[in-house]
Amino acid sequence: MKKHLVLLPFLLLFTACSEKLHVSSDYDKRVDFSTYQTFAWAPDQEEPGKANPMFDNEMNRKRIKEAIERELTALGLTRFDWAPHLLIDFHITIDEQVDYAVHDYYPFGFRYWPEYNVATRYFKKGVLIIHIVDTKKEQLVWQGIGSKTLDELPPDDVEERIERAVKSILAQYPSTRKN
C-alpha cells in the first residue's frame, strides 16, 4: 500500500500534464508578412493516417481546415484560389510514447544494493503542424506547431478543442493585422 501511495503524486502529475497544449512557431524573419493578403490550400493535402483513425480521420481534418480558414480570415487574409500569395497545408502526427518514473524507497542513503520501483506509462502524443508557403518564392515562410498528450478516447468537445488549438498556433503568426 505504501508503494502505491508514493506513486500517486507521479500519476497525478502525468494526468495533469495531459491537457496542456504546447505551441511553438518559426518563421523567416526577413519576410514582411503584412504584404500577404490572400491564401489558398496547397493542392496535395496529406491523407488521413491509417494508424490512428480515432484521431486522424476525415472529419477531424475537415474541422482543422475550417478552423485554420477562420483564423487566417481573422488575421486579415482572404481565401483566393486563383493566384494566392500563400499556400497552406497541415500535417498530423500521432506517436506512441513511454514515460518512466523511478523512485528509490530506501530512506537512509547508503546501502549495498539499490531498490527502485519504476512506473511506466504509455500514451499517445499528437502534433499538429501548420505550414505557410510563399507562392512566388516557393518557400516555407512560417510554421506553427501544437503538441499535446491525447486522451484514450476522443473528447466530446472535439470541435472546440480543435478550434482552441488552431487559434493558439496561429496566434504566433507574425501579422500586424491581428484583431
Image (tube, grey):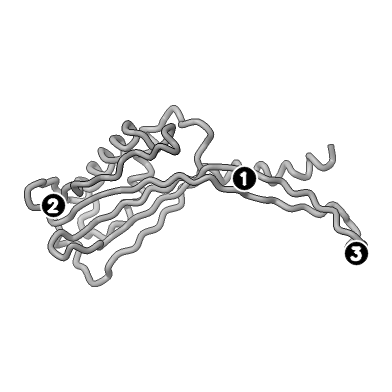
Of mark 2 and mark 1, the one earlier in the sequence is 1
Residue annotated with mark 1: 14
Which residue reaches farthest front? 50
Secondary element at tag 1: helix
Residue 152 location (% of width, % of height): 53, 33
Residue type of the residue flagged with mark 3 = Phe
Of mark 3 and mark 1, the one earlier in the sequence is 1
Q: Residues within 10 Å of mark 2 (few under 14, many from 20)?
A: some
Residue 79 location (% of width, % of height): 14, 45
Q: Could you tell me how far apart the alpha carbons at marks 2 and 1 are, in whole angstroms?
A: 42 Å
Secondary element at tag 3: loop
Q: In the picture provided, is 153 more to the left or to the right than 131?
A: right
Which residue reaches farthest bottom? 30
Judge by depth and name the residue closer to the eye, 149 or 71: 149
Secondary element at tag 2: strand
Q: Quadrant of residue 164?
A: top left
Residue 13 location (% of width, % of height): 64, 46
Res. 110 mark: 3
Residue type of the residue flagged with mark 2 = Thr
Q: Residues within 10 Å of mark 3 (few under 14, many from 20)?
A: few
Q: Is residue 54 above or below residue 123?
A: above
Q: Residue drawn 41% across and 30% down? A: 157
Of mark 3 and mark 2, the one earlier in the sequence is 2
Q: Could you tell me how far apart the alpha carbons at marks 3 and 1 are, in whole angstroms?
A: 30 Å
Residue 134 location (% of width, % of height): 18, 60
Q: Is residue 160 above or below residue 114?
A: above
Residue type of the residue flagged with mark 1 = Phe
Q: Could you tell me how far apart the alpha carbons at marks 3 and 2 are, in whole angstroms?
A: 67 Å
Residue annotated with mark 2: 38
Q: Quadrant of residue 27?
A: bottom left
Q: Residue drawn 67% across and 42% down? A: 11
